[in-house]
Image (spheres, rainbow, N blue to C red):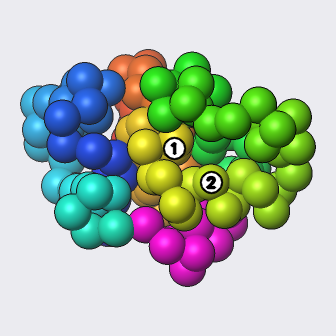
Amino acid sequence: MTVLYGIKNCDSVKKAKKWLEQEHIPYQFHDFRSEGFNAELLQTLLKYTELPLLLNKRSTTFRNVDQATKDNLTDEVIKELLIAQPTLIKRPLLQHQHTLLVGFKAEQYQEVFA
C-alpha cells in the first residue's frame, strides 16, 4: 500500500495528492496532526531514509526552536524534536514499497510509479 504522510493544509502535500489522484494511484493519507506521529512510525520511516533528511530546517517551526537545541542536533535530539513537533518533518513523505520520497517532485513520483 502506498502511504502519503503530511499535513492536509500543506501546499506540497496538496500537490502530491493531486498528482496521485490524476495518475489514478491508490494511496492512504496519514495526517500527522489528526493521526499523530510517534517513535514507532519514525522507526518505520527510518528503514527507508536517513534521519537528517526528515528535518525541515526551513520551516517556521524550526525557526522557533531555541538556538542551543539547533547547535546540538544529534540524532537523539532530532528524533525528540520530530516526535514532539511533527510540523518539523519535511512534507510530504511518500512511502511506496521499499522507497520513501521526501518532498514532492513530479519527476521523482513518476520514476517510482513507472
> Quadrant location of the C terminus?
top left
Point out which mark residue 81 bears.
Answer: 2
Tell me: residue 98, above or below residue 24.
below
Extent of the magenta region: 37-47
In magenta stretch: residue 38: yes
Q: Does the segment drawn in magenta span residue 6?
A: no
Is 41 left or right of 32, judged from the image as shown? right
Q: Is residue 58 visible?
A: yes
Image coordinates for residue 32, horizontal then vertical, percent:
33, 57
Q: Label 1 to label 2, Cα distance in Å?
A: 9 Å
Residue under circle 1? Answer: 89
Q: Position of residue 3 (x, y in %)?
A: 33, 59
Q: Nearer the viewer, mark 1 or mark 2?
A: 2
- Could you tell me what secondary structure mostly forms the magenta stretch? helix
Name the one closer to the observer, 52 or 97.
52
> Residue at the spot x=36%, y=52% of the render?
5
Location of the N terminus by quadrant is bottom left
